[in-house]
Image (cartoon, helix red, strand yellow):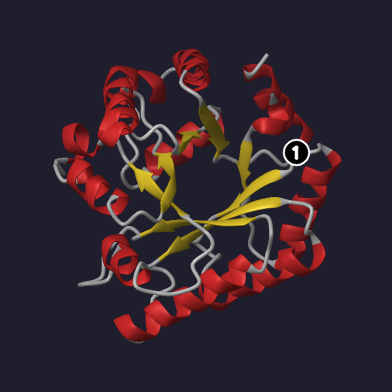
Amino acid sequence: MINNLRFELSFKDIFQLEEKLNFCKLKRINNINIPCKGHIKKQFYNKSFEYIRNNYEEFNVVYHYSLYHQYSKNNENSYQEFLNFYHNCNSYSNCDILLISGSIKKKNYDVINVLNNLKKEKDLHNQLGIAYNPYLNKYFNFSLERERYKQKISTGLINSIWIQFGTDIKLLEREVNFIQNYDNNKTLKLYGSLLIPSKQFIARFKYRPWSGVHIADEYLYSLDNFYSYTKDLISFYLDNNIIPVIETDFSSLVKFESIYGLFN
């Protein structure tokens, strides 16, 4: 089961990236995600792409392309840079892109704008992934997630949906049913964010909550409750053919074994 999961790598430099990629090889992890946030953005993001392509072709890689973090000068220039990255990814046989607007949307330059421009281009080989947050309406007072989803899907460029983490399974079930039943589309690949509970993670999240991530107090103040919920969430994902994506650090034997224990 572990080898079917996806693992997100966070790193501060190429040396740390190399260490984590080698750990993945040691543990036979083939499916990795490269985020676009924190230190990993702009030229370092592109440098990381080139490094993996040139040295680790055995990995199946999904690159999170943040339109906010990769924004450059103006909308036209930023779109051209994305288009260049898109075509570069086409030359890498095990490369896909998760396209995200980012925490702050630029005027007239978000995922919907880019997809509408992209469908006018020629020689499009790779389809794209998009994010979906089931919790925005109830917990963050944003009611347009479904409408934006419909607009993205209507471009015909989407083949995967990446579901945000949260701690309301009933709400998650409702939104997954919406995704699966919308336009009778059963061909989309579904991925689900998974945050592995630990005292360290809880302390960091209390201090600096992640934007758009809902974690109820009952899990932030009880590690046992959080662990139990995580087991339930894993079961929901697997029962609904949703591939879990580990978004917390896993690159030590203790952390990796903790994840292994959750799936066994």
Position of residue 222 relative to residue 67, above or below, is above
| Residue at 25%, 70% in the rendered image | 106
Specify few, some or many for label 1: CA neighbours under 10 Å numbering under 14, 14-19, or 20 or more: few
Instruction: Provide residue 239's location: percent of width, then percent of height.
Output: 49, 16
Residue pictured at 46% horizontal, 80% vertical: 81
Left or right? Give the position of 257 relative to 46: right
Q: Is residue 14 visible?
A: yes
Image: 229 above or below 128: above
The foreground one among 188 and 31 is 188
Which quadrant does the N terminus fall into? Answer: top right
In the rendered image, the quadrant that contains the C terminus is top right
> For the residue labelled by badge 1, is the local secondary structure a helix, a strand or a loop?
loop
- Name the image quarter holding residue 186: top left
Task: Pinpoint residue 219: horizontal percent, then vertical percent.
Answer: 40, 21
| Residue at horizontal 73 percent and vertical 43 percent from the top | 30
Q: x, y percentage for residue 140?
A: 20, 40
Q: Nearer the viewer, residue 228 or 126?
A: 126
Q: Is residue 26 left or right of residue 65?
A: right
> For mark 1, what is the residue?
252
Residue located at (73% from left, 63% from top): 52
Which image quadrant for residue 14?
A: bottom right
Q: Is residue 264 above or below residue 148?
A: above
For badge 1, the amino acid type reads Ser
Residue 72 visible from this viewpoint: no
